[in-house]
Amino acid sequence: MNAREQESPLTVVIAGGSGALGTRLAADLAARGARPVILTRRVDPTSSFEQVQWDGRTQGPWVDEITADRRTAVVNLAGRLVDCRPTEANIADLRASRVAATRALVAAAARRTAPVEAWLQAGTTAIWSDAGDHWCDELTPVPPDLPGVAALPQMTGVARPWEEAVSGAHTERLTVLRTSVVLDRNTPALNRLVMLTRAFLGGRVGSGEQWFSWIHIDDWLAVARAALGLDPEVILPNGVVVASSPNPVRNRELMASLRRTLHRPWSPPTPAPLLRMGAVLLRTDPALGLTGRRARSRVLAEAGFEFRHPDLDGALADLLT
């Protein structure tokens, strides 16, 4: 690659980029002079970003976006949404949609002469399943190697093979970003919590002692930029990085913070049996509300990364007021 090509804008191919995180990342990168290209199963004619259709499994014309002789990075966010019933068929589909897409991207990158500049591989803190009071960071073993923690099939059973599928990717820099719940006005997780709280149903869920790890969208975008090598002040090593605020909270603290932010009074708790019944009607997984992780990043702290929104009250006030 010649000097002129090295000075050209970075093309960032975002697989699964039509979702809430992908569109926010594309806008953030475009504003900083990069060229985002979204790989999507269904092209949206109203989108302001360049889109290329793919099926998330096989090679096709989309491969040219990765193999072209230019500065290129890959962001892999592809995969079915986890908000579904934890049936064997759904869990298999959650796993297959992530593993197949990752393998397709790895195969495409292997056709390049030079490696891609950076690869941001999505992951999830749910890889630790329901980790109780364990602190989970980049050095914490994954269940069943984490003492006393069972490897839940819809969590560890999906997240672990997803990470393993990126092994051997032809890239100079690889970051596996284990992301906690991203707080953003456009994400389903926060929207559902806000809806319930505004309806005076913002009480703790179950015991309320389960941990809730989270990250503000602004901080997630900053971590993503660092992973792509676009922040000269934060140099991240290859490997796993936990994208989570250093201050996780328990569910009861989360709901209390939402009530304060939205000016709602105390609300009665939602017993676990009632949540499980409701999850059947809503066709979702009750474990999303009844389990949790106490996550934080050792790597970000050592790299000198500074969170703009380290505390939950401030993060919610920024997003909801």
Image (cartoon, rainbow, N blue to C red):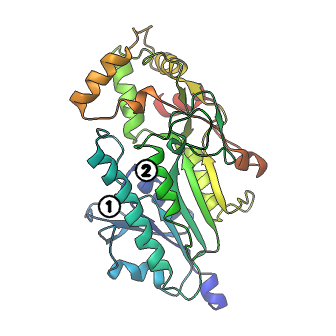
Give the vertical position of 265 relative to 165 (above or below). above
- Left or right, 28 with reference to 50: right
The x and y percentages for residue 39 are 37, 68
Name the residue rendered at 64%, 45% in the picture: 141
Q: CA distance from mark 1 to mark 2?
A: 30 Å
* Crowd tier of the residue under label 1, counting other residues whose Cα lies within 10 Å: few below 14, some 14–19, many 20 or above: few
Residue 215: name its quadrant.
top right
Q: Amino acid at mark 1?
A: Ser
User: Which residue ends up furthest to the left in the rendered image?
Assistant: 281
Element carrying mark 2: helix
The x and y percentages for residue 47 are 32, 61
Residue 280: name its quadrant.
top left
Question: Label 1: which residue?
Answer: 47
Q: Is residue 280 visible?
A: yes
Question: Label 2: which residue?
Answer: 158
The x and y percentages for residue 230 are 64, 64
Callout count: 2
Considering depth in this image, is 276 or 295 the residue closer to the camera?
276
